[in-house]
Amino acid sequence: MTAERWAARLPDFWQADLVGFALLVTMSIFVRVPLYGDAGAALTITLLVEPVCLLAARLVRHRLTRPNEPAWGGLPRGLVVAIRLVLRCGGAALLLAVWVRLVCLWGCWTVPHWMVWQSWATPIGFYAIVLLIWTLTYLWWHERDAARTARQRAAQAETEALRLELTHLRQQLDPHFLFNALNGIAAEIPVHPRAATAMVCELADYLRYSLEQRDRTVMPLRREIEAVDSYMAIQKARFGPGLRYVVEIDEAAQGMLTPSFLLQPLVENAIKHGATEGQQARYVHIAARSGPEGLALSISNPGRLDPRWRTKGNPGVGLAVLRRRLELLYPLNHRFDLRQVGGDVVAELSLAGSPCCV
């Protein structure tokens, strides 16, 4: 098994433990060789002591990071952790110094010219510093990892909430559309029963298409145009030759992703308000093009735009849902506007980049 595969199988901080242990072993050997004047003694002491130091480091940090560690009389948490850190690292260093002493007595190894207190104080100080550095490094890593995990969970929760809201917004369109379509069918039944029957058939086809796409947040623009075609077939059954619509889409724009059923509320508004003044004929023009700034869409129909439409209050379910979906899917990367261009009302929509939360 390669070193990379071994590293992937170990817990994250074990990799740092192995690096720290290798550095400690190397440093200890280089320090002990001149102290004892015997390479074999230095190697033996190091191999018997440093693994115990690694175990002590893991035990110290395990005790420090226990979730139910009791508080000390209302002292600040940071101060309590610092006191526990010093006490536990000092206690572990004392035990390691005892172990070093026992190993040296077993091998009859001594450091020339060292006083008795030096043979105790030096390993205690050395291992206390090593354990402090090792444990502080772990605590820093532990806090950083906990903060990263918390951020990831918060981001996942936010993403899931956005997905749920997008699904809810998308599902609002179907009842809204169905309500309007049924009202239109009801109006045609007394005077044009055949047209009403055709509208029911086309409505069934459209709802089947909508059901198939219910779980899709985004779809290619060409599929969105297919949905518009299905919707327009319903309206054609109602208005007959009195409804004309034209679609102009460049080749590059057809494969670009858009929010599902993005155009339907805009086209519905265009038909609703699109009768030429003094006539019953309705005309809808849909255009889409791809450019350096993204996808540009426009839906135009004859009519007059209320100049107060921005501040008029409730914009209607379709436009309200459209705006909120754009805010969620294209934050800061979309633009929607209604303009009066000659005798036409033009809905202009631009989308930059790829949709998020999908």
Image: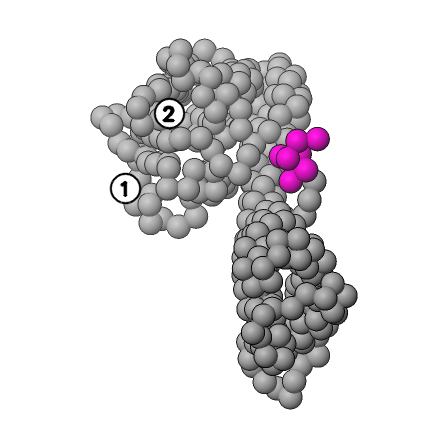
Where 244 falls versus 44 (above or below)? above
Residue located 60% across and 50% down the image: 22
Which residue is depicted at the point 66% across and 34% down? 5
Say which residue label 1 marks. 307
Image location (x, y in percent) of residue 221: 47, 20
Magenta stretch encompasses residue 108 = no
Asked if 169 appears above or below 245 in the picture, the reply is below
> In this picture, which residue range is highlighted in magenta?
1-8
Residue 7 lies in the magenta stretch: yes
Element type at mark 2: strand
> Image quadrant of residue 174?
top right
Above or below, comparing residue 1 to residue 194 in the picture: below
- State the residue at coordinates (57%, 52%): 26
Q: Position of residue 339 (x, y in %)?
A: 28, 33
Looking at the rendered structure, the kind of residue marked 2 is Leu
Q: Identify the disc placed on residue 295.
A: 2
Label 2 and label 1: CA atoms lie apart by 26 Å
